[in-house]
Amino acid sequence: MIETDRQSWGADAHERKVENLYGGGIENYLGHHDGYLNFGLWEDGITDYVKAAENLVQRMGTLLGLDHGSKLLDVAPGMGTQDIYLSRNFSPLSIDGLDVTWGHVEHGRRRAREAHLEDRVRFSHGTATEIPFPDQTFTHVLSIEGPEHFDTREKFLQEARRVLQPGGVIAMADFIMKRRPRNLVEKIVAEAARSLWKVPRANVYPADVYAEKMHGAGFENVTIEELGALVIPGYYFEQMKPETIKAITRIRGVMLARLSLLLDVAVYRGFTMGLLEYVLVRGERS
Ligand SMILES: C[S@@+](CC[C@H](N)C(=O)[O-])C[C@H]1O[C@@H](n2cnc3c(N)ncnc32)[C@H](O)[C@@H]1O
């Protein structure tokens, strides 16, 4: 295993901006939402956030086809809860998590220790566009709600292909732009969501372009499933609950909590306007 320690990003690096977005107040996160940051998959009558978050992770493990022989690279694992879940429920040989936010790496390592899984579930600090592992190390690559941030998603796809063995599988939970904004209000909503969320302009495109980029990076049998209706409203209403707002304010401070509230509104409005969609993407390395 190659385990990087803390990286430092250049003053103008996109990675630094993303780390600032996620790192604020991270030491206070502890048990809130069990450390999950994903939007959740709110199906089959699920009304509890953690259950919705786990349901999404379960769906991703199934989409990847994880089994006892898998060596998984999880890019952007956040605070690592999803990898503890995947390790317990799919028993892969190993999971390596790679996240750009140092505070997330620390949480992940702590969680792995507490779960007595530190030999099988490891976390490194680094970026999706320069993956610190040799060619063909992994059988599977996962990213849940990370790829929209990567500078660029296309570079990440090339890196993912490099570290995957032939026939290896990639699965992503991601966001796409469904159509171009048609008027000023739509333009403002789309731009607010993109810039608050630190999404590079180069990552803003619809599903057919996404599929082309997957093929261009060397993936075949590509599928893209739109799931926004089962994902975005459930998360939005969870985030708007007074107790969630209070918890986020306590964890991240007033300014960052307001910023994330604004972001949640922009994403939800973007979805209801038909601008934004949530997708599950899968491909096989050629
Ligand atoms: C919305 S969170 C999702 C975290 C986790 N997958 C979850 O669902 O709980 C986005 C994650 O992407 C990570 N991230 C963003 N850009 C990254 C990059 N270039 N390389 C690695 N991780 C990145 C952030 O640090 C953050 O942990």
Image: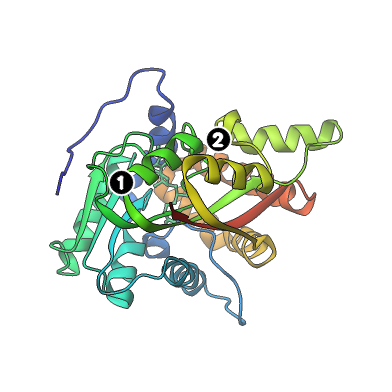
Which of the 4 quarters of the picture holds residue 62?
A: bottom left
At x 60%, y 29%, the residue is 201
Q: How is the image coloured?
A: rainbow
Question: Which residue carries the number 2 mark?
Answer: 199
Q: CA distance from mark 2 to mark 1?
A: 24 Å
Q: Nearer the viewer, residue 180 or 198?
A: 180
* Residue 25 visible in image: no
How far across and how far down the image is residue 51, in percent? 48, 75
Could you tell me the amino acid type at mark 2? Val
Between disc 2 and disc 1, the foreground one is: 1
Q: Is residue 4 visible?
A: yes
Local SS, label 2: loop
Q: Is residue 104 left or right of residue 33?
A: left
Mark 1, residue position: 163
Q: Is residue 198 above or below residue 51?
A: above
The amino acid at mark 1 is Val
Q: Is residue 173 above or below residue 51?
A: above
Determine the residue positioned at 60% across, 56% down: 279
